[in-house]
């Protein structure tokens, strides 16, 4: 449990920062608006996953440390603002780390609850990207999954790798690291080489 | 159970096609984007209904055949694209069939769970239209229920007819056909004669 | 129970009016569209709260009087339209009363269910503002919480006051009145003096 908990808290801080960055960049929101968007980004994906699975209580509703993690993320972001702003491009690494963490955690949670691996992969991907989708919908942006170079599909690939290694009883910490690394690697290469998914038509 | 299951799978294929059509028409999305929008359109309404009712597990979360039905719909749409595109107008029939199927299924499910007929009618209508509403919100379109000639109200009319016939113990297959036919008929006439609901003011 | 029930029904009527006003003002919607938006505004915040808490059945799903309350609000709004329209500015008082009522009711419900006070304050605020946020998202408006002078933060302040008085066992009716009055007062002063939250950056 320990490692999962640390990862969840860490992913929450990271997602709150990434959400707050997006909120402030778009429209110069006030403190409440930025905090609200950071909050939604951090808890949106996991909350939707748990509500779809009927897995109650929701993690953050039952453990106020997740709220403190979000506030920590917002404060980190505010008080290192001048230095953060110079590295906006580099900062998307926060988002990439966040989606990697949330994908493997969401996939594992779903498969451990006894659902089909196809559902586990979808829920892993949802955990990672739906917070950002809700954030973008609220701020009237095109949702991140329709915009970016390979993004949600990197999460799907990592979720599938996790499930394969899981079926071979690979140790979970090792599996977290390998599958998370795959997501981060695909995403970084996709940004660098501007990889994209073929058009449908 | 058999007929309901066939209808649910059929409605899911049909809604995935209608969602994928809408997604691709709007903005030339990639394979992932089109599949995602088809997916949301197909499972959105039923998922919202079940989450509002607290009826767990959600149908598609517990039965991976619904995922395969969605993928089938996406592939059908892709590989008959050139022929489909000529008949875009005619294709809205898919959407009409989808809303008719989902309305009667959603209404029956809710009344069978013991809720009030007024709630059953609302939930039947939600099952049919909310997938499209979520789709339109994600793709920054005006939600279909605010745009179209008589649309959600046709679903409400069909749901009410279903509940009346249900109270008279009409055989469910017959009830499905009659109530579904009412929705399709109202919708087709509304499109043909450009019927609309009076303005509020 | 009596006073809470009366307040809930009253808040529902008031929110349906405020939602219908917003819907009609924006785009001259038809009867269905206005009713739908009034409905979503009235039930959205409480439904989201209960779905996040896993508190089933949802209030309005189990008690059709809430549906009648919404229809009443829509009809009141329609048949006093000419007089209402002259007092649009004054009418935002309806919205203010609605958020005050829903904040204290949502906060109390959450704390009584045994959740942490921090979660209770968040859920009280969500009960009040998320119906409006969903309404604005559906109608492609900037969500109210990003637009207005002090709005959601007034709800948070009222929720925190409620929780403090609750911890001192202040009588609930008195607590409802004092905490609700704080929200209304802050909101009215904020509109009058154009108070706003400092920018994040």
Image (cartoon, coloured by chain):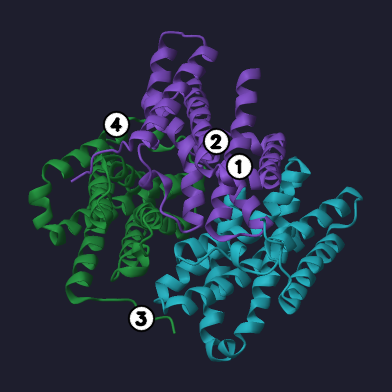
Chain colours: A green, B cyan, C purple
Seen at 53% across and 36% down, the residue is C50
**Which is more N-terminal, label 2 or label 1?**
1
Q: CA distance from mark 1 to mark 4?
A: 38 Å
Seen at 34% across and 67% down, the residue is A153
Residue B155 figure quarter: bottom right
Seen at 55% across and 33% down, the residue is C55
Specify whether disc 1 shares its chain with disc 4.
no
Seen at 47% across and 9% down, the residue is C170
Q: Nearer the viewer, residue C164 or A165?
A: C164
What percent of the width, then of the height, locates residue A167?
37, 56
**Which is more N-terminal, label 3 or label 4?**
4
Please tell me whether mark 3 or mark 2 is closer to you in this view: 2
In the shown orientation, is residue B168 left or right of residue B48? right
The quarter of the image holding the C terminus of chain A is bottom left
Residue C94 marker: 2
Residue that mark 1 sits on:
C17
Q: Residues within 10 Å of mark 2 (few under 14, many from 20)?
A: some
């Amino acid at each position: 449990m320990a490692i999962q908990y640390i990862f969840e808290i860490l992913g929450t801080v990271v997602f709150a920062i990434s959400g707050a960055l997006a909120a402030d960049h778009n429209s110069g929101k006030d403190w409440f608006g930025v905090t609200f968007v950071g909050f939604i980004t951090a808890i949106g994906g996991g909350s939707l996953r748990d509500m779809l699975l009927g897995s109650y209580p929701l993690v953050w509703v039952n453990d106020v440390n997740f709220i403190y993690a979000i506030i920590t993320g917002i404060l980190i972001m505010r008080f290192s603002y001048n230095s953060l702003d110079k590295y906006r491009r580099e900062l998307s690494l926060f988002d990439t780390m966040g989606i990697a963490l949330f994908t493997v955690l969401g996939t594992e949670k779903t498969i451990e609850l006894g659902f089909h691996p196809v559902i586990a992969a979808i829920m892993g991907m949802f955990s990672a990207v739906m917070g950002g989708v809700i954030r973008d919908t609220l701020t009237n942006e095109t949702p991140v999954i329709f915009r970016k170079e390979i993004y949600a599909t990197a999460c799907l690939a990592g979720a599938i790798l996790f499930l394969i290694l899981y079926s071979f009883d690979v140790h979970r910490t090792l599996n977290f690291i390998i599958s998370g690394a795959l997501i981060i690697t695909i995403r970084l290469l996709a940004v660098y080489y501007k990889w994209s998914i073929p058009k449908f038509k």
